[in-house]
Amino acid sequence: MTLETTYFLSQIVAAVAVIASLVFLALQIRQSKRALRLNTAALQISAYHQVIQQAVDAALQPNWAKLIVRARTEQASLSDDERVRLGLLVWLVLFPHEIALDLARRDAISQELW
């Protein structure tokens, strides 16, 4: 084996090593992106759970129930303060579902859960 043949073989080995390292790097990046996406989804689900808990806590308060009844029966008589509180209650009810829809669209939660 001549020196030139050894040189060409070492170049081939180096090229294969570069390609293998690029493939490994691509796999690591994909795995890292997947882990980051799952971690983000877990944080969003945790926030979603907290918002739902706040909505449930709010809905269980008697003054909220009275406000809803008044809004259904005599909406025109609500004060500005009561209208703001009612809007907040509606937001507390709808916002968790908006988060769940966003998570479902990004496949962060299963379609069955959504």
Image: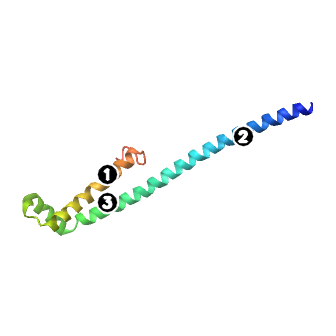
Q: Amino acid at mark 3?
A: Ile
**Residue 101 placed where, x, y %?**
34, 48
**Marks 1 and 3, how far apart at CA:** 11 Å
Disc 1 or 3, which lies upstream in sequence? Answer: 3
Q: Nearer the viewer, residue 71 or 5?
A: 5
Element at badge 1? helix
Residue 67, percent from left and from top = 14, 65
Asked if residue 69 lies left or right of residue 87, the reply is left
Tell me: 91 left or right of 16: left
Real-space Cα separation, disc 3 to disc 2, in angstroms: 51 Å
Residue beneath disc 2 = 18
Which residue is pictured at 64% across the width and 45% down the height?
25
Quadrant containing the N terminus is: top right
- The residue under label 2 is which amino acid type? Val
Which of these two is toward me, 62 or 30?
30
x and y percentages locating residue 84 in the rendered image:
19, 64
Q: Residue at x 30, y 52 (%)?
A: 97
N-term-proximal mark, 3 vs 2: 2
Residue at left offset 10%, top offset 63%: 70
Question: Taking 70 as reference, is 42 left or right?
Answer: right
Marks 2 and 1, Cα distance to the nearest angstrom?
Answer: 46 Å
Residue ID for mark 1:
98
The numbered mark at residue 52 is 3
Are the residues flagged by discs 1 and 3 in contact, CB closer than 8 Å? Answer: no
Secondary structure type for disc 2: helix
* Labels 3 and 2 touching (C-beta < 8 A): no
The crowding category of the residue bearing disc 3, from other C-alpha atoms within 10 Å (few below 14, some 14 to 19, many at least 20), is: some
CA neighbours of label 1 inside 10 A, class few (<14), some (14 to 19), many (20+): few
- The answer to whether residue 3 is above or below residue 91 is above
Label 3 SS: helix
Which mark is nearer the camera, 2 or 1?
2
The nearer-to-camera label among 1 and 3 is: 1
